[in-house]
């Protein structure tokens, strides 16, 4: 694939990690979570940074991870930690910005098992058009 595929800046305006109580886990063992699937088609590692924005609190910035050259990574947001090692808050709406050293492609997925029927949705993130 061409190195020019993808973008360096991506946005997801609708983030929400619902609380999953042990009794609310689905019969399949799933836990409510969100993830970013990052596809790196380039021949260089992509150094990625997440910044999270909230309605009623200061942003959490600088969550870093690497996606290998010509690889994909499913980054679980329920396992992401801020710079002080704390897990991201649950039951709080947020939005995120992903920046990358290489052009990548980003998809956002949510699994919600807080109800009897498992809910899943997946959408492409919004790419910065001038990137």
Image: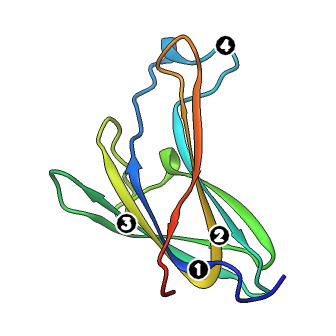
Q: Which residue is mark 1?
A: 7
Pointer 2 and pointer 4: residues touching (CB < 8 Å)?
no
Q: Which residue is drawn at the image coordinates 56% and 18% (left, top)?
A: 25
Q: Which residue is mark 3?
A: 83
Q: Foreground residue, 118 or 23?
A: 118
User: Quadrant location of the N terminus?
Assistant: bottom right
Is tag 2's residue or tag 3's residue first in the polypeptide sequence?
A: 3
**Residue 91 at x, y = what percent?**
32, 35
Is tag 2's residue or tag 1's residue first in the polypeptide sequence?
A: 1
Q: Which residue is mark 4?
A: 27
Of badges 2 and 3, nearer the viewer stands 2
In this rendering, does residue 87 appear at all? Answer: no
Is tag 4's residue or tag 1's residue first in the polypeptide sequence?
A: 1
Mark 2 neighbour density, 10 Å: few (under 14) some (14–19) many (20 or more): many
Q: Which residue is drawn at the image coordinates 74% and 75% (left, top)?
A: 68
Pointer 3 and pointer 4: residues touching (CB < 8 Å)?
no
**Residue 22 at x, y = what percent?**
50, 17
Mark 3 neighbour density, 10 Å: few (under 14) some (14–19) many (20 or more): few
């Amino acid at each position: 694939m061409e190195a020019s595929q993808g973008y360096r800046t991506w946005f997801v305006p609708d983030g929400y990690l619902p609380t999953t109580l042990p009794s609310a886990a689905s019969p399949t063992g799933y836990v409510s979570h969100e993830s970013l699937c990052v596809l790196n088609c380039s021949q260089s590692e992509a150094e990625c940074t997440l910044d999270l924005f909230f309605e009623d609190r200061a942003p959490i910035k600088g969550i870093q991870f690497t996606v290998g050259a010509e690889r994909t990574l499913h980054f679980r947001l329920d396992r992401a930690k801020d710079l002080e090692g704390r897990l991201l808050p649950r039951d709080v709406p947020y939005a995120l910005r992903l920046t990358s050293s290489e052009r990548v492609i980003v998809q956002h997925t949510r699994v919600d098992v807080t109800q009897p029927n498992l809910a899943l949705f997946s959408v492409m993130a919004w790419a910065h058009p001038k990137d």
